[in-house]
Image: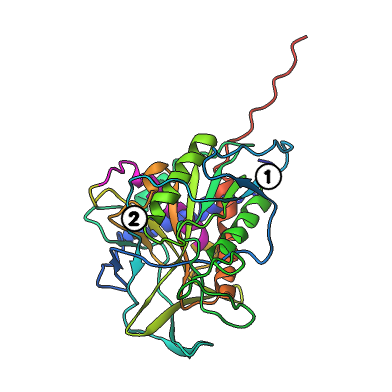
Amino acid sequence: MKYCKRAGDRLRRVNKLIISGLTTMGLYFLSASGIYASLENRLGFDAAPKRMRNVTVVEAAAPITTPAPVPAAAPLAVHIEQEPAAEVTMETASPVSEPPQPGTETVLISDNGETVLETTISGGLSIKNETQYWVDAAQIIETGPGLTLPDGEPQILVIHTHSSEAYTQAGLDHYEASDTNRTEDTNYNIVRIGDELTDILTGAGLNVIHDRGIYDYPSYTGSYNRSGAAIAQYLESYPSIRIVLDIHRDALGSDGVVYKTMAEEQGVCASQIMLLVGTDESGLEHPDWRQNLALAMYMQNAVTQANPTLMRPVDLVRQRYNQHLSTGSLIIEVGSSGNTLQEALAAIRLFGNAVAPALCELVAAEEPAEEAVE
């Protein structure tokens, strides 16, 4: 707790203003025919760190081994590289976004000659609701996330269902591709983004486990089955975990044109980020999805206060994407295939630095030591 940088008073003051404004205006929904619509399936692969971390290697068939104890005052960061777990019966579909509607766009040509359209998708505290459920953004923000992080134990799991998702190659960031915008090289795929976020959160005093395993290669089919089995195993081994963040890279494009979403914040050009929340509307059991939405709006609020254009609207979808395994489960889409690795890294740094103090506010207060009785 003493390592968490607290910004509670500031958050509460701004929250009151935001809630008042949302209540007056009503909930702002983005329809599927609006800025972009979500399809049933997603294909993609991601990026990784520029340097290898100290990791605990876990055998495929063996249970995850609890790391050696660390001093109570030190935040926990565990990077784990693990073979895919045995498949179980879960959903395999993954979200994909359609390109934005025409607007103010800049036409670019990538290093490989691909046409890329640069655009900014307005987000703020809005929800793109692709379900039939009614949700009240103002009430959700006022109520808060309803979640407490235990102090001194693993609190957050970072994982990548589509670990090989990567970005447009540019500058010095070139990799050996396993498929279009995909690589197993964790210096350049989405795992690199997870490393960056893990470093920021642990630097703020939070305890994070980062699974750097590859779950979508060589077989993309069943990647959610494999990552879901791993998540379930982590939750069993570390029951203190309250937040599960599945980090992806989005794919926006059509007719040979690729889109990149951009925001300029704090003098930095970065990709945009989107939080995705699943529901039970597809027919699969997921009774507590509203708790995940509450956490998403809490994080969206914190990031938007610091970086008004960084976040795309929160995407509320019919599928559950393993989020039924634990409350506090979200998908984070960092940039799209048209963005570069450096733009995605800039985005996750802005995101992490804004969300870390808000998550620290959720850490349970330390119990005062009992005085010895004479």
Name which quarter of the figure residue 254 lies in.
bottom left
Going by the picture, which residue comes out furthest to the right? 374
Q: Is residue 91 left or right of residue 310?
A: left
Badge 1 is on which residue? 75
Residue at figure coordinates x 50%, y 87% from the top left: 110
Q: Which mark is residue 92?
A: 2
- Whether residue 292 appears in magenta in the rendering, the answer is yes
Q: Is residue 235 left or right of residue 55?
A: left
Name the quadrant of the C terminus. top right
Residue at figure coordinates x 41%, y 80% from the top left: 259
Mark 1 and mark 2: span between their CA atoms? 34 Å
| Neighbour tally class for label 2: few under 14, some 14-19, many 20 plus, Cα within 10 Å | some
Q: Tally the numbered discs.
A: 2
Residue 107 higher or lower than 70, as above or below: below
Q: Position of residue 364 (x, y in %)?
A: 57, 36
Q: Which residues are magenta?
A: 284-303
Residue 253 higher or lower than 82, as above or below: below
Q: Position of residue 210 (x, y in %)?
A: 58, 51
Q: Depth check: 133 or 9 in front?
A: 133
Instruction: Tell me the element at label 2.
Output: loop
Snapshot colouring:
rainbow
> What amino acid does circle 1 point to?
Pro
